[in-house]
Amino acid sequence: MAFSFQECMDFVLPVVLKLGENLAKTDLKTMEIETKSSITDLVTVHDRNIEDALKGKLIEKYPTHRFIGEEDSSIKRHVSELTDLPTWIIDPIDGTTNFVKGMPIIGISVALVVDKEPELGIIYNPYANELFTAIRGNGAYFNEKRITTSGVTDIQRSVLNMELSFVTSKRFRNLYLTRFAHFAHKTTGVRSYGSAAMGLCYLACGRIDAYQADGLCSWDVAAGVLIVQEAGGYVVDSKGGELDLMKPNILATATKELGTQYLEEIRQADEKL
């Protein structure tokens, strides 16, 4: 391999930080907003500009690498196949609805995936000045300080993040409402932040203890999965199998012991569907 993951991090991180700095200066009152697949699926010129800027810089530096980006996939109405080749998976603004409403829970998410496994992850929230990074085998970091998950092992003492915005989808409505009703009295509390990337980061640094969502896309989770794993967390498919990055129905927890309890509760909840 003609590159190192640290070299990749050193190259792309300043680009992400600069793009985030510019994004935080956006005048939301004059910003044009469009819809994609539905009225709940928003996009702005900033989503496209950030993705284009990242892709342009990376192509120039790594011309043999491949790319999967949210906005490019939306325009083409096709998601590129994930191969074993080095592939950058980009979500220019994870939490676009939060962004357009002025809610400061968003993340620029960038992952480098090799052999279908995330090897490098960056998630940056410019509003909160929160930077989460990881390289496989080197730990996870929040603003350059190493982090670990909460270590919680008891589901009754855990706080769960579910992406409840999915109740707007006919396909997922019953699933989410059923699971939410089940978890509401099994956990300390359930939260919904509107950004998968930031939810996974909150898990990695111990602000929450579990994250669960079905129906996400690769760009929603690719960087966050690695950050959670490097922080000592447990990540699987919501049925307990190996997570498929291209069809991520995800369960991530602070510990494997906690994850085992959540998988059993998901099974019981799904029996009610």
Image: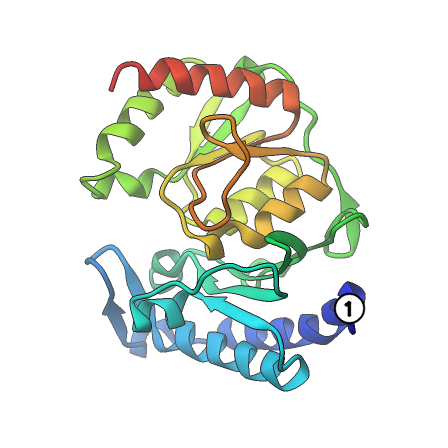
Where does the image place residue 70, in percent across and percent down from the top left?
Answer: 41, 65
- Residue at horizontal 67%, vertical 73%? 12
Q: Quadrant of the N terminus?
A: bottom right
Q: Residue 218 placed where, x, y %?
A: 47, 53
Q: Of residues 247 and 90, which is closer to you in this image?
A: 247
Residue highlighted by disc 1:
1
**Which residue is nearer to you in this view: 166 or 129?**
166
When the figure is inspected, residue 52 is found, relative to residue 83, above or below; the finding is below
Q: Give me the residue at 64% from left, 41% from top.
A: 228
Q: How many numbered marks have been drawn onto this rendered protein structure?
A: 1
Q: Quadrant of residue 115?
A: bottom right
Which of the pair 173/215 is nearer the observer? Answer: 215
Which of the colour schemes (rainbow, by chain, secondary structure, one colour) is used? rainbow
Report crowding for label 1: few under 14, some 14 to 19, many 20 or more residues within 10 A (C-alpha).
few
Is residue 179 rendered to the left or right of residue 195? left
**Farthest residue in the bottom direction?**
60
Q: Secondary structure at mark 1?
A: loop
Q: Is residue 233 left or right of residue 242?
A: right
Considering depth in this image, is 43 or 86 the residue closer to the camera?
A: 86
State the image quarter where residue 153 is shown.
top right
Q: Left or right: where does residue 170 sit relative to residue 268? A: left
Relative to 230, is 165 on the left or the right? left
**Residue in the image at 64% along x and 77% along y:** 15
The residue under the point 52% across, 70% down is: 67
In percent of width and height, residue 126 lies at 57, 65
- Quadrant in the rendering for residue 242: top right
- Residue 25 in view in this figure: no
Vertically, is 73 above or below 210? below
At label 1, which amino acid type do we have?
Met
User: Is residue 167 at least partly visible in the picture?
Assistant: yes
**Direction front: furthest residue:** 84
